[in-house]
Structure formats: C-alpha cells, structure tokens
Image: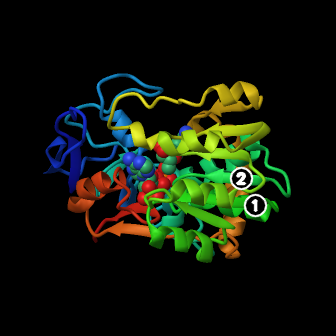
C-alpha cells in the first residue's frame, strides 16, 4: 500500500519536497492486531507544527515515518477479538492507504445518521475543540456576543453554530466574500468580517456595536489585535490556534494592555488533554449533526498523492471547510 512520509523538515514555509510518497508491503498481523483500510484522512494545521524539529506540546513527527494523522476506515483483517472484519473505526493511522493497529486507540463508528467523514470534522477532534473552547472557557451565555476567527473552517464553523444554539450573537471572521457569505447564510452567523477586504476594520466595528464578550481565537496576528480593542469588561478568550504564525516567527500581541484594563481572561488549551470530556461533547455534536442543526462543509483531495498539496493549501486558507483526503479503493 502507499503512504506519505516526512522526507525533510521545512526551513520556514513547508514545500512539496518535504514529503515523499512510497509503497510498502502489507505487514503480517500479530496477535491482537487489526488491519484497516482507510477511507478518509484528516489534514489538520497541527501537523505543520509537528514537522519542525523543536518539541512543542507534542513530540516532533519522525523523519522517514508515515505522517501523523486521524483516519476513518474499515477493518479488513482482524486478530483482535474486539474488532470484526467490516466494522468502521476511527484511528490515527496517518497518511497511508492502510494501517495496522493493536486496537487500543480505535473507536467504532456508527454511520446510520452521521456520515463517516464527519467523524474527522464536526463530530471529531475539530468539533470537540469548538465545543470545549465554547462551553469550558468562553462560557458564553445567552445574549452575549461571541467572535470566532477562521469561521468557515472545521473548528470555527462549529463554534459559531454552537454559540447560536446557545442563544448568543455569533460573529465570524473569514478570508474572502465567498467564505463570509457561507458563514452568514448557510451557517447562520449574525455577521462575518472579511479580513482580506480593505475595510475590515470598519466591518469589525459595524459587527460589534455592543462590543465582544468572548473570542475563540484560531489565527492570531493583526486582526486578533484589533478584536482585543472591542472586548467588553470581564471578557473571555479561548486561545485555540495561531495559524497565521505556524510558518513564521513570533506573532506579537500589541494591545496586551486591554487584558488589564478590561480585566480579560485568556486561556490556551490542547484538546487531546481533555479526553474525559470527549464522550459528552461528541454525543452533543453527534445529535446536532444528525438532526441537521450543525452543518459542515468539506474540501476533499481526490487521492493520497494529492495530500501534500492539499495540506500546503490548508496553511494558506485554500481549503473551504474541513480538509480531507479521500483514499481510493
Ligand atoms: P480550518 O478548517 O479553519 O482551516 C484553516 C483556516 O485558517 C483556513 O481555511 C484559513 O481560513 C485560515 N488561515 C490559514 N492560514 C492563515 C493565515 N496565514 N492567516 C490567517 N488565516 C489563515 O482548520 P481547523 O479548523 O482544523 O483549525 C483551526 C485552528 O484551530 C487552527 O489554528 C488549529 O491549529 C487550531 N486547532 C487547535 C486545537 C487545540 O487543541 N488547541 C485543535 C484543533 C485545531 P481563511 O481563508 O478564512 O483565512
């Protein structure tokens, strides 16, 4: 089967040369192991951070090993009594058409009401990230104004829709008119600021006439800085991601004084450290997706070979919704 390994570490911007497609033999299964054929691979911004040599909150991706990543697929051979051939599972088998697992990190999936791919998006890690930030950190109450950046994306789209379901006013930030229109009209946000437009600062003022009570930050940089100046007293900020800085040097926060004057709380979080809440969050997200109350969009790369290019695109905002790779039969 084919897989993609990390061939070299990026200098600053990742390039196609950092990846290598190779073909490897299907291994013999040992006792307790299962063989899985992957149907979808998830591409996520955190992978870019793991490509660097420096240890962040997690170990770096090893060179010449399969790129890390979440996958959904079907068991095709099993020497584990807990898993039968034909069952659908989510796992972390990486950028590969197949993979072997001892079953410990697998979870069985029910696709009766929820499409398989959604378990990598709105009903998976990105959805959980949105749920955690909104309910545990932002603690957004009815009537409050909530702002989220990268609002059309996997995490951001769920943040805004959950906020609306809780009776908040949801404001998004996204790049370009098409994404903003989708955020407003399809996802039901109250407003969406196009940060690529010349008048984005005026748009921000117009969208937040009574200020902002809570921010879910995915991007960082100049726009985040401007949003800080709109914060109401005792506002909360869930610091989820700073994608604008994943391929560059530091991202300074210039308006840090507002943290003091408005008595703000800022809390960063890593969703994999809160596994205890996943069953609760995923249950809620699953029922919202099954009933159509939470909608989602996907960008699907057509084949494993297209994964590197799709991943580089994700870091530049070329994706529109959750970025996935479909693995061919
Ligand atoms: P998205 O689906 O939101 O895709 C990334 C989006 O970020 C792009 O579509 C683009 O949207 C925006 N973007 C990309 N590059 C830039 C840039 N240089 N400047 C500004 N915006 C950019 O990805 P996810 O939903 O998977 O992730 C969103 C954020 O959440 C990321 O920062 C990620 O690292 C973080 N995250 C954190 C987790 C945690 O545990 N803390 C867990 C999961 C995700 P646009 O075109 O609108 O700019």
Residue identifier under label 1: 169
Residue 265 can be seen, yes or no: yes
The residue at 51%/54% (across/down) is 150
Left or right side of 251 for 279: right
**Could you say whether the residue bearing mark 1 is in a helix, strand or loop?**
strand
- Secondary structure category for the residue under label 2: strand
Between discs 1 and 2, the one toward the N terminus: 2
Answer yes or no: is residue 23 visible.
no
Q: Nearer the viewer, residue 1 or 66?
A: 66
Identify residue for label 2: 146
User: How far is mark 1 from mark 2, CA to CA?
Assistant: 6 Å
- The spot of residue 50 in percent (x, y) is 36, 34
Residue at image position (35%, 29%) is 249
Answer yes or no: do the residues labelled 1 and 2 have beta carbons within 8 Å?
yes
Where does residue 311 sit, x and y in percent of width and height? Answer: 31, 53
Q: Residues within 10 Å of mark 2 (few under 14, many from 20)?
A: many
């Amino acid at each position: 089967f084919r897989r993609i390994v990390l061939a070299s570490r990026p200098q600053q911007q990742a390039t196609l040369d950092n990846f290598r497609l190779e073909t490897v033999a299907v291994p013999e299964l040992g006792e307790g192991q299962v063989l899985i054929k992957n149907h979808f691979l998830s591409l996520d911004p955190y992978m870019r951070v793991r490509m660097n040599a420096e240890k962040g909150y997690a170990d770096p991706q090893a060179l010449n090993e399969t790129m890390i990543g979440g996958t959904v697929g079907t068991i095709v051979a099993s020497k584990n009594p807990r898993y039968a051939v034909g069952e659908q599972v989510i796992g972390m088998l990486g950028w590969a058409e197949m993979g072997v697992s001892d079953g410990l990190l697998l979870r069985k999936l029910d696709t009766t009401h929820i499409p398989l791919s959604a378990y990598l998006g709105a009903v998976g890690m990105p959805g959980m990230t949105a749920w955690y930030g909104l309910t545990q950190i932002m603690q957004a109450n009815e009537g409050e104004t909530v702002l989220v950046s990268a609002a059309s994306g996997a995490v951001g789209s769920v943040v805004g829709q959950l906020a609306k379901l809780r009776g908040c006013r949801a404001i998004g930030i996204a790049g370009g008119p098409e994404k903003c229109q989708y955020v407003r009209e399809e996802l039901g946000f109250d407003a969406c600021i196009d940060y690529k437009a010349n008048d984005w600062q005026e748009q921000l003022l117009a969208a937040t006439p009574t200020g902002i009570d809570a921010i879910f930050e995915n991007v960082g940089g100049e726009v985040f800085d401007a949003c800080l100046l709109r914060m109401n007293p005792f506002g909360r900020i869930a610091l989820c991601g700073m994608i604008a800085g994943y391929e560059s040097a530091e991202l300074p926060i210039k308006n840090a004084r507002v943290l003091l004057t408005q008595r703000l709380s800022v809390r960063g979080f890593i969703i994999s450290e809160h596994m205890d809440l996943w069953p609760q969050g995923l249950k809620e997200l699953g029922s919202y997706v099954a009933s159509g109350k939470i909608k989602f969009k996907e960008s699907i790369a057509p084949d494993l070979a297209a994964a590197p290019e799709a991943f580089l695109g994700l870091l530049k905002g070329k994706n529109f919704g959750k970025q996935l790779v479909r693995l061919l039969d």
